[in-house]
Amino acid sequence: METLDILIGVAVLIVLAAVGAVAGLVRPRRRRSSLPRGAGGAGRSVLGPRSDTDPLPGVGDDAEVPRDSPSRAVDVVELPEEPSGPLTERPAPAAGRLVRLRERLARSNSALGQGLLALLSRDTLDESTWEEVEETLLLADVGVGPTTEIVDHLRERVRVLGTREPAQLKEMLREELLAAVDAGLDRSLATERRGERPAVVLVVGVNGTGKTTTVGKLARVLVAEDKDVVLGAADTFRAAAAEQLATWGERVGVPTVRSERDGADPAAVAFDAVKAGIEADADVVLVDTAGRLQNKAGLMDELGKVKRVLERHGPVDEVLLVLDATTGQNGLRQAAVFSEVVQVTGIVLTKLDGTAKGGIVVAVQRQLGVPVKLIGLGEGPDDLAPFEPEAFVDALLS
């Protein structure tokens, strides 16, 4: 009997020990708490923070904000809207551009204006001095006829007035140069629409004068005047010409009509450009042509063909001849031939910033009987300026 009681007691102890061990392994479940919406995702829940006495990490503890971290509100930033089309430049206004470029022009032509003033300011104006004045004008490419007129007029005025004051001499020289430049010529560009069609401007010249660049810069001048422009890449012989012209157009949002193949008929491209301008209700169509030597009869005949084909749409309103100011008297011979073939209506003098031969303005106008309408005074996109006689002469004498 005692033995049985002992065995029952031992069994009870074993059962109690087992129950205790199991109870020690089971932990009570922790209550869940919801994370505020927007802090960790919409409606997502994580477990609440564990107590300081809890030695084990709880699920979701790493989602909590550290206790020592400063809180910061979420900033709402408005992103800029995407542009609806390609970015284009807004060219500088063309009006008064020559005045802004006066310093550059004065530096490049100082030998003419300042040289003449130095000669006229001498104590004695003898025959030798007047010969030097004449030589200075000739070296500046003013031309023999205009030079003779300027010197004769100055000599007579100085003799009659008997003045030696520098200010009066400068004013007399200014008046004579203005007369030689002919401030009364009409230098406006024919770029207004003609009824149901745009104005057509044909740009011609020899190789290397900067013709395509001039067309691109002229497009900027017209865009600055709020005109709708179409470019025609009729220089089909130089592979890069059409691409270069299209790049100029893209910068100011102007379309370019071009051929898909090299060596295409330039007259056909020019015709298509005007046709596109009519369909688009454009104000002006600028047609670039291939550079050609004035002594190549075949090339000059082809240029005449381009003009005749353009005239199927109506008269060509403006024919601009681009001349390199550094070529001097050779440029005048070029101008004469081009004028015979396509009846030039205006001159664009480029590279005038790199020469002291500003007198070419006088000579080319006198020989052709047409005005200089635009001058290039640098390589910048807005360095093509409408020619203003008074600003030009003042720059020479500044």
Image: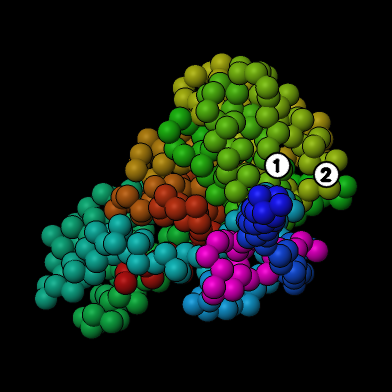
**Looking at the image, which is closer to me, 160 or 176?**
176
Q: Which residue is mark 2?
A: 280
Q: Is the residue 397 above or below the residue 286 in the image?
A: below
Residue 136 rendering spot, x and y as whole percentages:
24, 55
Q: Say which quarter of the image contains residue 113.
A: bottom left
Regarding residue 238, the answer to whether it shows in the image is yes
Residue 267: mark in rendering = none
Residue 173 rendering spot, x and y as whole percentages:
33, 70
From the image, give the main secondary structure of the stretch colored magenta. Answer: loop
Relative to residue 51, is residue 151 drawn left or right? Answer: left
- The kind of residue on which mark 1 rests is Pro
Q: Which residues are magenta?
A: 43-64
Residue for point 38% across, 70% down: 394
In the image, is residue 146 part of the stretch drawn in magenta? no
Residue 397 rendering spot, x and y as whole percentages:
32, 69
The answer to whether the residues at label 1 and label 2 have Cβ atoms under 8 Å apart is yes
Residue 255: mark in rendering = 1
* Colour scheme: rainbow
Q: Residues within 10 Å of mark 2 (few under 14, many from 20)?
A: some
